[in-house]
Amino acid sequence: MIHILLFVIIAIFIVIIIFSFPQFSPVPYFPSNSKDMWRILEALAIRNDQTIIDLGAGDGIVIFQAAKESYSKKLNTRFIAVEINPILLLVLHIRRLFHPNRTNIRIVNRDMFVMDYSKLTSTDLGKFQPVLTFYIYVSPWFIEKTVLNIVKQIKIFDLVSYFYQVKCLPKHKEKIEVGVHSIFTYS
Ligand SMILES: C[S@@+](CC[C@H](N)C(=O)[O-])C[C@H]1O[C@@H](n2cnc3c(N)ncnc32)[C@H](O)[C@@H]1O
């Protein structure tokens, strides 16, 4: 009994450490609001020739729902979940195992602030997937850093930002959908 208790205490301690270490979670884990899910899916405009990249995918609430929609519409959209937190990565891998569209979902352990997009293979992106759509739910202090890292590597992309406006992207490309929280689309 004492062993189990000790194990539980150590496990909780490890989880707290991982979630509070800035190295793992400079942007804290907070899932997109499920009441806004249909608005988010609409903003992502899921289609055939597209790869959707969720930067800081969390537990995958958005990416797995989007992949489900793509599967039910028999589309070949590809999905990449980028995450840095080891516990959330484990959750993503387990959820992927049971997902009907798992062959189109990739989970990558990368730092979204410095991620080298050229390292994503053509298989990751899908050979004929010219449309790249990013989904971000990143605190305002880190949005610029995340988006500028995309801008300096990729010329054409769409981006959906949950909750926060992306000030470094052109205003004329911006559309705002208001739900529980705002959804900013740049395309
Ligand atoms: C606000 S949550 C959003 C989760 C998910 N995208 C959603 O909408 O439900 C931000 C996520 O970014 C992850 N994250 C923080 N810093 C990161 C980094 N440098 N690289 C990759 N992911 C990071 C966190 O672990 C967390 O899961």
Image (cartoon, grey):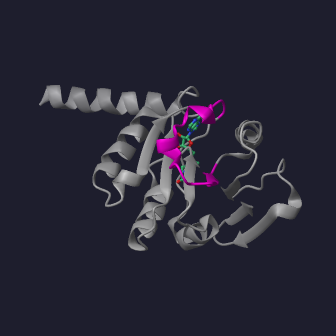
Judging depth in this view, the residue of 121 and 95 nearest the camera is 121
Q: Residue at coordinates 31% horizontally, 46% vertically from top-left?
A: 94
> Residue 74 placed where, x, y %?
41, 70
Ligand 1 quadrant assignment: top right
The single residue placed furthest to the left in the displayed view is 1
Judging depth in this view, the residue of 165 and 78 nearest the camera is 78
> Residue 140 placed where, x, y %?
74, 46
> Residue 169 placed where, x, y %?
82, 51
> Residue 34 placed where, x, y %?
50, 66
Residue 152 as seen in the image, left or right of residue 45: right
Compared with 94, 186 (above or below) is: below
Numbered range of the magenta stretch: 113-137
Using the rendered image of the protein, determine whether residue 81 is visible from the camera's viewpoint.
no
Q: Residue at coordinates 50% horizontally, 58% vertically from top-left?
A: 62
Quarter where residue 176 is shown: bottom right
Q: Residue at coordinates 44% horizontally, 42% vertically from top-left?
A: 107
Residue 109 as seen in the image, left or right of residue 39: left
The image quadrant where one finds the C terminus is bottom right
* Number of numbered callouts drawn: 0
Q: Residue at coordinates 42% horizontally, 50% vertically from top-left?
A: 105
Using the rendered image of the protein, determine whether residue 34 is visible from the camera's viewpoint.
yes
Residue 45 as seen in the image, left or right of residue 167: left
- Residue 116: in magenta span: yes
Residue 185 as seen in the image, left or right of residue 97: right
The image quadrant where one finds the N terminus is top left
Judging depth in this view, the residue of 39 and 53 nearest the camera is 53
- Residue 183: in magenta span: no
Judging depth in this view, the residue of 56 and 44 nearest the camera is 44
